[in-house]
């Protein structure tokens, strides 16, 4: 797959291409190539900025000989599917992965709910902020009462309650902590500490149905199996009391009782600790299977590390700081949570494409994330979708909440061209009064399939 490390901001990159395209079209017209292609119009603010006041750098780039003069005329349109009633309030951006040429756009700067495409933001933020090698600790300290201990949650939601787990790579378990405490003399009472996170454990915009259906649990710093009531089932119903349940399981394994009055003994050191898989492995759960709880804990840890706070409200600033560090302008972005479950999340197709450019170009060693994106007709949340397209041709993050269907990733098109895309089928009013259905997901998939079919011949007309 073609790789390109992105070195400039979205405005500069798109602006340089637009100016070059204008000059190219003018030269082409002068050579008798016909003026139809010159009707292509561009709607990004960057086009206006750089057309009115082109920098010397842009002019230099625009006047260099390019291969664009010999590029084939693009005539393949997907407007019939993007304009269908089932595509709702469609937004999207599709670019050539090698040249960054905009092939198709429809309100690319407009913001809308993200659904699980938000997990791309969360994943790159976690890798940038926490680092790929960071492991999340769970520790046990001596308690304030004789024979007591306190288990302290550090945010590892993959902590195993038993010997097996849906998280097949999970490296930390209550059994390890139990063995260490027993080796140190055992315990008769257990307290628990979840103070790493503040505020509410449940986001106000989440529907409790999502907990019952196994998509999300209350977000606390201490839990086992991401709150699943059946540890090995991906969509097991989730408990409403994850911290209390984890403490009870730990106490039971020790033959002790839970006592919420017990605090950490002042000045004490841990008597037991276990560590999660590294962040570089946790993001696989986030992207392949769209794990909401792992995404939420990573987003919260990013906020804490960046000093923006320890609540849901802190997630937005933590993500924006991470994006800024990567050179991405987060204008219009709103991170209500880290998973995309909230209808209050907002991002543009342009911002998501920028993130995918960084990943595709392996900037800051983010390229391995491509391996964790679902592949059509093969893996993860795309396993049963886009069967009409050759299996594995589309690698993308899926997204679905009541207000939007989304798909964002990379594809090897029918003609072999590499494309980066972010496409969204949102309701016009995301206040909760209107919802999407399977017909809208089918419309989204039809747009992706039509894009694959067009490839490098994709037209913006």
Image (cartoon, rainbow, N blue to C red):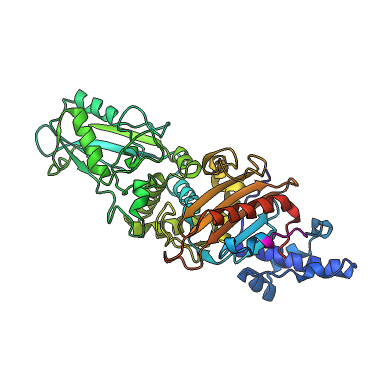
Q: Quadrant of residue 204?
A: bottom left
- Position of 27 relative to 208 (above/below): below
| Quarter of the image that includes the C terminus | bottom right
Mark count: 0
Task: Name the residue at 60% across, 42% down.
Answer: 376
**Residue 55 placement, left or right of 222:** right
Extreme top residue here? 183
The residue nearer to you, when weighing 356 against 423, is: 423
Q: Please give the name of the residue rendered at 49% of the width and 66% of the height, measured from the top-left corner.
A: 332
Q: Is residue 249 visible?
A: yes
Give how far across and how far down residue 41 sits, in percent.
Answer: 71, 70
| Stretch of the chain drawn in magenta | 75-80
Residue 296 in picture, x, y percent from top left? 38, 49
User: Between residues 269 and 286, which one lies in front from this camera angle?
Assistant: 286
The N terminus: image quadrant: top right
Q: Is residue 101 magenta?
A: no
Q: Quadrant of residue 277?
A: top left
Q: Extreme bottom residue here?
A: 52
- Depicted 12 relative to depicted 337: above or below: below
In the image, taking residue 230 as reference, residue 328 lies left or right, namely right
* Secondary structure character of the magenta stretch overall: loop
Q: Is residue 97 visible?
A: no
Magenta residue check for 76: yes
Query: Which residue is farthest right?
Result: 32
Query: Picture coordinates of residue 452 (x, y %)?
Result: 69, 50
- Please state the horizontal and vertical placement of residue 372, each as a whole percent of the image: 53, 41
Residue reaching furthest left?
Answer: 146
Q: Is residue 396 above or below residue 281?
A: below
């Amino acid at each position: 797959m073609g790789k390109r490390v992105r070195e400039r901001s979205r405005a500069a990159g798109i602006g340089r291409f637009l100016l070059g395209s204008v000059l190219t079209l003018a030269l082409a017209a002068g050579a008798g190539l016909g003026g139809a292609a010159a009707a292509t119009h561009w709607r990004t603010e960057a086009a206006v900025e750089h057309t009115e006041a082109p920098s010397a750098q842009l002019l230099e780039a625009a006047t260099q000989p390019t291969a664009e003069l010999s590029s084939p005329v693009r005539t393949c349109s997907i407007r019939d599917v993007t304009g269908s009633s089932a595509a709702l309030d469609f937004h999207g951006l599709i670019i050539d992965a090698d040249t960054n040429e905009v092939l198709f756009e429809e309100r690319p700067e407009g913001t809308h709910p993200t659904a699980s495409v938000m997990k791309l933001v969360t994943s790159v933020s976690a890798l940038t902020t926490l680092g790929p090698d960071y492991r999340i600790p769970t520790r046990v300290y001596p308690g304030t009462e004789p024979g007591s201990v306190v288990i302290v949650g550090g945010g590892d939601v993959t902590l195993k309650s038993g010997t097996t787990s849906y998280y097949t790579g999970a490296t930390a378990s209550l059994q390890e902590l139990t063995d260490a405490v027993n080796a140190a003399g055992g315990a008769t009472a257990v307290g628990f500490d979840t103070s790493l996170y503040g505020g509410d454990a449940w986001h106000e915009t989440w529907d409790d149905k999502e907990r019952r259906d196994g998509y999300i649990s209350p977000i606390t710093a201490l839990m086992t199996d991401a709150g699943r009531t059946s540890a090995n089932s991906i969509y097991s119903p989730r408990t409403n009391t994850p911290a209390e349940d984890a403490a009870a399981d730990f106490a039971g394994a020790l033959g002790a009782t839970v006592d919420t009055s017990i605090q950490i003994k002042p000045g004490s050191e841990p008597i037991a600790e276990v560590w999660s898989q590294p962040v570089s492995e946790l993001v696989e759960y986030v992207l392949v299977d769209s794990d909401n709880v792992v995404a939420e804990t990573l987003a919260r840890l990013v906020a804490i590390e960046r000093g923006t706070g320890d609540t849901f409200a802190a997630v937005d600033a933590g993500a924006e700081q991470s994006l800024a560090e990567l050179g991405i302008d987060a204008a219009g972005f709103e991170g209500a949570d880290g998973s995309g479950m909230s209808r209050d999340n907002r991002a543009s197709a342009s911002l998501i494409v920028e993130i995918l450019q960084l990943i595709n170009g392996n900037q800051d060693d983010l390229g391995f994330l491509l391996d964790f994106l679902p592949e059509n007709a093969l893996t993860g949340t795309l396993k049963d979708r886009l069967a009409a397209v050759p299996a594995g041709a589309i690698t993308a993050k899926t997204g679905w909440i009541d207000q939007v269907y989304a798909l964002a990733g990379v594809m090897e098109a029918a003609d072999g061209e590499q494309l980066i895309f972010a496409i969204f089928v949102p309701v016009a009013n995301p206040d909760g009064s209107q919802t999407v259905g399977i017909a809208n997901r089918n419309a989204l998939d039809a747009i992706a399939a039509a894009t694959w079919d067009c490839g490098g011949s994709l037209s913006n007309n």
